[in-house]
Amino acid sequence: MDTVHSAVVMMQWRRLSATHSVDTVYTFTGQYPAAWFYVTGSTETRTRLYRMGINKYFDIVKEDFDIMGEHQSEWEWYEKGRDYQAYAVHRKNQ
């Protein structure tokens, strides 16, 4: 990922509802379209909860966002149901 021209934002989403998180990402990337969100949990369980949230809204947000997952220290395009250690989300060009 090219982060030279992007703002990198680390968020901890545990206190936000999934709907609020999606709204937050849309709002923030509307103002900062070059930004990447980097998301990881402080535990494997929390990271799994993030994956569940992404899966829940994936069919909706995949039209507007590029979503990548870190699997075995390599970044790849997100696949539903696959285990990842972290996630990166970027607004597609409009």
Image: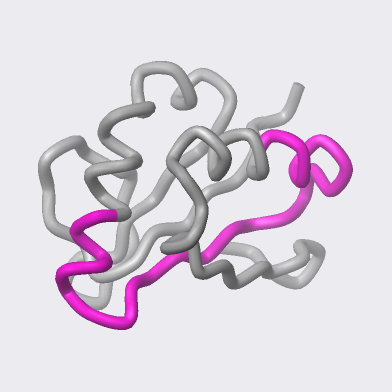
Along the line of sight, the residue nearer the viewer: 71 or 85? 85
Identify which residue is drawn at 76% across, 21% down: 94
User: 29 and 45: which one is in front?
Assistant: 45
Seen in the picture, residue 2 relative to 18 is either above or below; the reply is: below
Which residues are the magenta region?
A: 26-49
**What's the image's color scheme?**
one colour
Q: Which corner quadrant of the image does residue 2 belong to?
A: bottom right
Q: Quadrant of residue 50?
A: bottom left
On screen, residue 87 versus residue 49, left or right, reads right
Which residue sits at x=68%, y=69%?
8
Callout count: 0
* For residue 6, side relative to residue 46 (left or right): right
Q: Residue 45 location in percent, x, y?
A: 16, 69
- Position of residue 48 measured from the top left corner of the image (x, y, whole percent): 19, 59
- As drawn, the residue found furthest toward the right would be 31
Q: Of 14 and 72, which appears nearest the observer?
A: 14
Which residue corresponds to the image point at 20% horizontal and 65% vertical from the top-left?
A: 71
- Quarter holding the N terminus? bottom right
Q: Residue at x 33, y 62 (%)?
A: 75
Q: With respect to residue 62, does 1 lie above or below?
A: below
Nearer-the-camera pick, 13 or 15:
15
Report x, y in % for residue 17: 46, 44
Left or right of residue 76: residue 33: right
Examine the rendered structure and indicate whether residue 43 appears above or below residue 89.
below
Is 14 left, or right, of 28 in this rendering? left
Q: Is residue 76 above or below residue 52?
A: below
**Residue 29 belongs to magenta span:** yes
